[in-house]
Amino acid sequence: MDNFRIQGGATLKGRVRISGAKNAALPILCAALLADGDHVFRNVPNLMDVRTMGKLLRTMGLDAELADGTFSVRSRPVNEPVAPYDLVKQMRASVLVLGPLVARYGRASVSLPGGCAIGARPIDQHLKGLEAMGAQIRLQHGYVHVDVPKGRLQGAELVLDMPTVTGTENLMSAAVLARGRTTIVNAAREPEIEELALVLNKMGAQIEGAGTDVIVIQGVEGLDPVDHAIIADRIEAGTFMAAAAATQGDVFLDGVTFDHLEAVAAKLRQAGVVVEREGSGVRVAAEQRARGTDATTAPHPGFPTDMQAQFMVVMTTASGSSTIVETIFENRFMHVPELNRMGADISVSGRNAHVRGVATLQGAQVMATDLRASASLVIAGLVAEGTTEVLRVYHIDRGYERIEEKLSALGARIERVPGHA
């Protein structure tokens, strides 16, 4: 496993191009199952999860290839609509094939994501929605088996218990070929859902309301292949914004949509950081130490849970104290012990993290536990005095394309080094 070795103390300056959004690309790649023909998806990041999705599509008989940011899919009818465990266990987002497969073929067998039973981070909202549309569900031997006795889903009103992103995406993809009208109430509102709806509409679907909490889909008879460029990754952009703020740098993020970053920008501005929309992107500049600022994670358009760890690093060396409240996921403060090993002063009480700013962090060997925690430890290493080694960076490779190269181009002293298995 590779590690990152970081020599801290550098101030980030310059221009960085933000990659395409993985969380937008994955459901859009699955949408290729809905229409035969040649699909072309541009600005797709070369990440482990994207490559895994390519493998999954190929197991179903599609031609799928990623080269130079372009993901080409030649879609044809699937004989066996099955997503096997050995691929789904590598990536929870594999469950996003469920909606398209059931919509197109009236049946599908998909391994429970990550091998999990219906429990933590469940897919129960996906399955309840499909049942309301006329599907029959069986859970057997670790797989979800879905059959539609009438052969085609029926439009229905689907009221989600919570605004789940993947649930909204799966049900939206399922509804585009259903008979009649489907309404998704309490839908998630993330930009990635708007992007999926845009792509499906380009393919001939009839979707209204994406980006709001009520989405209306009028089913159609068939869809056509599509050529589309994926939006920029707002979480990668937010991570570089946090890195610029933490190192008191001056960085221009190229190719991003400012509207997708408003919640992060607002918090950084409260902390005294300059965040400005400029032309094709966003400039982030911090001439002095940040101010302690409270933050509470919330579904979009609130402050994203995927930015909680990175923002916490900015607060570790801020003047004053702050409280960060995590409302989305349990056990998402796993980075806190590692930051405290680097000299941070953070205490956790339930879903609250209390951060007292310190003058500086100290380099140390730290362990990456998940994707966003990994990013936070990298930012901490950029700030810290001395050398930091972040172990097990395969987590970060799931969501950040060439992050060490991009940071190096901004002046960071970071290198990828071989680790021990």
Image: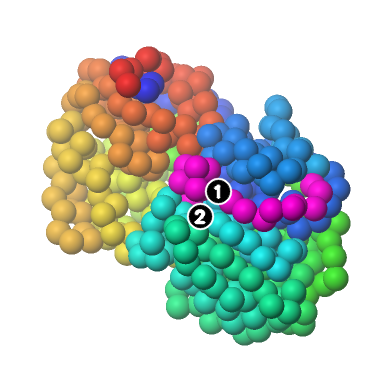
Pick the quarter of the image with the N terminus. Answer: top left
Label located before the other in sequence (1 or 2) = 1
**Residue beneath disc 2:** 111
For the residue carrying disc 1, how many other residues have a C-alpha within 10 Å: few (<14), some (14-19), or many (20+)? Answer: some
Question: Is residue 388 rendered to the left or right of residue 374?
Answer: left
The percent coordinates of residue 212 (x first, y second) are: 60, 72
Q: Residue at x 38, y 61 (%)?
A: 117
Residue at the (62%, 43%) spot, across then down: 56
Image location (x, y in percent) of residue 92: 48, 51
Whether residue 35 can be seen here: yes
Q: Report how far apart the C-alphas of labels 1 and 2 lie in the structure.
A: 6 Å
161 relative position to 248: left or right:
right
Residue 19 pos. (x, y %): 60, 36
Q: Position of residue 31 (x, y in %)?
A: 71, 55
Which residue lies at the image location 70% right of the left edge and 81% below the top edge? 155
Q: Amino acid at mark 2?
A: Ser
Q: Which residues are magenta?
A: 75-92
Is residue 129 found left or right of 225 in the rendered image? left
Q: Residue furthest bottom?
A: 157
**Label 1 residue SS:** loop
Q: Which mark is residue 84?
A: 1
Residue 245 in view:
no
Q: Does residue 291 sit above or below 129 in this rendering?
A: above
Give the amino acid type for the residue marked by disc 1 in the picture: Pro
Residue 118 placement, left or right of 109? left
